Image (cartoon, rainbow, N blue to C red):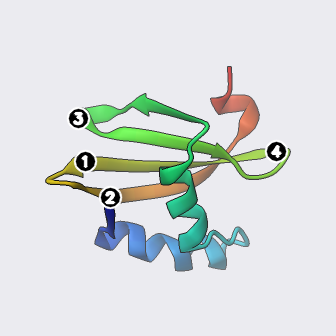
Amino acid sequence: MAVIFGPHAEGKFELLRRRGFSVSKEQVLDCLENPDRIKEGYKGRRVAQKVMDPEHVLRVVFVEMEGMKRVITFYPGRRERYEN
């Protein structure tokens, strides 16, 4: 399935890098293709989640439409907050 990044998601790579938390496009794509879990989000959006390291998960907010996934945003989160 094709994946496109919305403008906000495109800007998140640089924003996170400046804040000392680098996330690659490959990590976001891997999270979408091989998530540890997917939850329903706000306004029909879905949230894919994958463990990044012992302390963090990567969360990717996306919508599915017309045979593609559109990434709205993504962010790292603490595992203790989002697991269980």
Name the residue at 73% across, 37% down.
Answer: 79
In this picture, residue 78 sits left or right of residue 8 = right
In this picture, residue 53 sits left or right of residue 2 = right
Q: How far apart are marks 3 and 4 (CA)?
A: 28 Å
Q: How crowded is mark 4: few (under 14 residues within 10 Å), some or many (20 or more)?
A: few
N-terminal label among 1 and 2: 2
Numbered disc 2: secondary structure: loop
From the top left corner, tell me how far across and down residue 81 is, in percent: 68, 30
Q: How far apart are marks 1 and 4 (CA)?
A: 29 Å
Q: To which quarter of the image does residue 41 belong?
A: top left
Q: In the depicted view, which residue is nearer to us: 54 or 16?
A: 54
Which amino acid type is marked by label 2?
Met
Q: CB of mark 1 within 8 Å of CB of mark 2? A: yes
Numbered disc 1: secondary structure: strand
Residue placed under numbered mark 4 in the picture: 55
Residue placed under numbered mark 2 in the picture: 1
N-terminal label among 3 and 2: 2
Q: To which quarter of the image does residue 16 belong?
A: bottom right
Q: CB of mark 3 within 8 Å of CB of mark 2? A: no
Mark 1 vs mark 3: give the one in front. Answer: 1
Disc sitting over residue 43 in the figure? 3
N-terminal label among 3 and 4: 3
Disc sitting over residue 75 in the figure? none
Name the residue at 73% across, 52% down.
Answer: 52
From the top left corner, tell me how far across and down residue 70 is, in percent: 29, 59
In this picture, residue 24 sits left or right of residue 46 = right
Which amino acid type is marked by label 1?
Glu
Q: CB of mark 4 within 8 Å of CB of mark 2? A: no
Q: In the depicted view, which residue is nearer to us: 28 or 55?
A: 28
Which amino acid type is marked by label 3?
Lys
Residue placed under numbered mark 1 in the picture: 64
Which amino acid type is marked by label 4?
Glu
